[in-house]
Image (cartoon, rainbow, N blue to C red):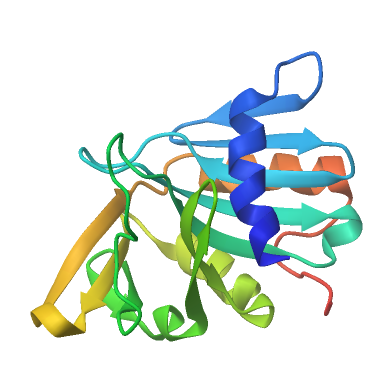
Amino acid sequence: MKLSALLCSTSLLLASNASAAIFESGDWAAAKVGHACHVFTQRAARDTSGALVFTFHNQGYSSGFGYDYHPWPGETTAPWDEDDFAVLAFDGQESWLGDEMFTHEGTGGYGAYMTDGMVQDMITSILNSKTSIEVMFDRSAKGEIWLYGKFSPSGFAESLQKAGEWCAFDPRNLPSS
């Protein structure tokens, strides 16, 4: 399931209007590919190659959330260490939700993915955000917290609503998967 978010962001980049329904609003977009709907960021802060990606299957079951990091050309190692952990902040305030994320290394890139049961809390946090969603990593060996992406909530609610229509789920009341 977690790997599906990483593969999803790659496949979304390759999807055309002929093979996927796409909706864009502000800094977010929604796409329906097959039986799954995805809500993802289109823009991030400078100097990041990551994206926030939600995945919802029919009626909202098996929902997932992740930060997909795609390596820069020439980058050959993971962007974080094994002992580092994700930190999420909304409007500059750190949240406990980062504690519910774990890192993954894959052939197409790297990612940090959220425990399935916390996706509803992530949605609520973004809906309540006014200015920013920040993905950071506490780099323990370096004694620093590094910002990996700062995203705008602009257009999230509209993109989420469209995904809910396409995949028949209530974005504010996901079913228990």
Residue 43 left/right relative to 149: right
The front one of 26 and 113 is 113
The front one of 121 and 139 is 139
Q: How many marks?
A: 0
Above/below status of 157 relative to 140:
above
Residue at point 43%, 35% (across, down): 27
- In this view, which residue lies farthest toward the top? 18
The percent position of residue 131, horizontal first and vertical second, equals 29, 53
The percent position of residue 116, horizontal first and vertical second, equals 68, 76
Residue at point 59%, 63% (across, down): 65
Above/below status of 97 relative to 167:
below
The quadrant of the picture occupied by the C terminus is bottom right
Residue at point 36%, 44% (across, down): 71
The quadrant of the picture occupied by the N terminus is bottom right
The percent position of residue 50, horizontal first and vertical second, equals 39, 47
Residue 173 left/right relative to 25: right
The percent position of residue 138, horizontal first and vertical second, equals 23, 78
Residue 106 left/right relative to 23: left
Instruction: Tell me which corner region of the image, top left, top right, bottom left or bottom right, holds residue 106.
Output: bottom right
Residue 81 left/right relative to 8: left
- In this view, which residue lies farthest toward the left? 143
